[in-house]
């Protein structure tokens, strides 16, 4: 049995909201569940697993720009800011720090 951790972070990589789900849950589904807890923001940076028209439309409804690389199988590839996307390493660093505490 696996589990997956979905996290909303601020610009510094500090966690604001977390959702623990079964390992089979897609990133997109986790993002939709965490959507109500999103703080006011200008941009949301996420990985390809969060790329869906439904999620992009929900973000646009709240005037949040999506910086999400498109999945390869999309017919129309939405543009995203590659330079801004590189700051996503802060979120990966946060997950690395959390994993240091997994045996407590």
Image: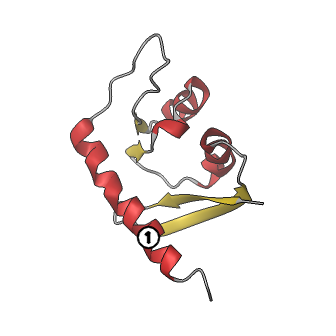
Quarter of the N terminus within the rendering:
bottom right
**Residue named by callout 1:** 96
| Up-down relation of residue 63 to residue 34 (above or below) | above
In the image, is 74 to the left or to the right of 102?
left
Give the crowd class for mark 1: few <14, some 14-19, many >=20 residues within 10 Å: few
| Up-down relation of residue 18 to residue 78 (above or below) | below
Quarter of the C terminus within the rendering:
bottom right
In the image, is 65 to the left or to the right of 19?
left
Residue 3, quarter of the rendered image: bottom right
| Up-down relation of residue 43 to residue 6 (above or below) | above
| Residue drawn at point x = 52 percent, y = 58 percent | 8
Front position in the image: 65 or 69 = 69
Task: Look at the numbered disc 1 and give the secondary structure of its residue.
Answer: helix
Q: Picture coordinates of residue 73 (x, y %)?
A: 50, 18
| Residue drawn at point x = 57 percent, y = 33 percent | 55
Residue 50 seen in the figure: yes
In the image, is 8 to the left or to the right of 82?
right
Residue 62 seen in the figure: no
Residue ranking furthest to the front: 1
């Amino acid at each position: 049995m696996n589990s997956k951790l979905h996290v909303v972070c601020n610009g510094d990589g500090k966690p604001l909201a977390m959702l623990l789900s079964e390992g089979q849950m897609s990133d997109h589904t986790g993002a939709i569940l965490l959507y109500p807890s999103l703080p006011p923001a200008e941009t949301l940076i996420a990985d390809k697993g969060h790329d869906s028209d439904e999620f992009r439309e929900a973000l646009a409804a709240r005037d949040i720009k999506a910086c999400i690389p498109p999945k390869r199988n999309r017919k129309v590839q939405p543009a995203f800011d590659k330079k801004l996307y590189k700051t996503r390493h802060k979120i990966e660093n946060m997950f690395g720090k959390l994993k240091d505490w997994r045996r407590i």
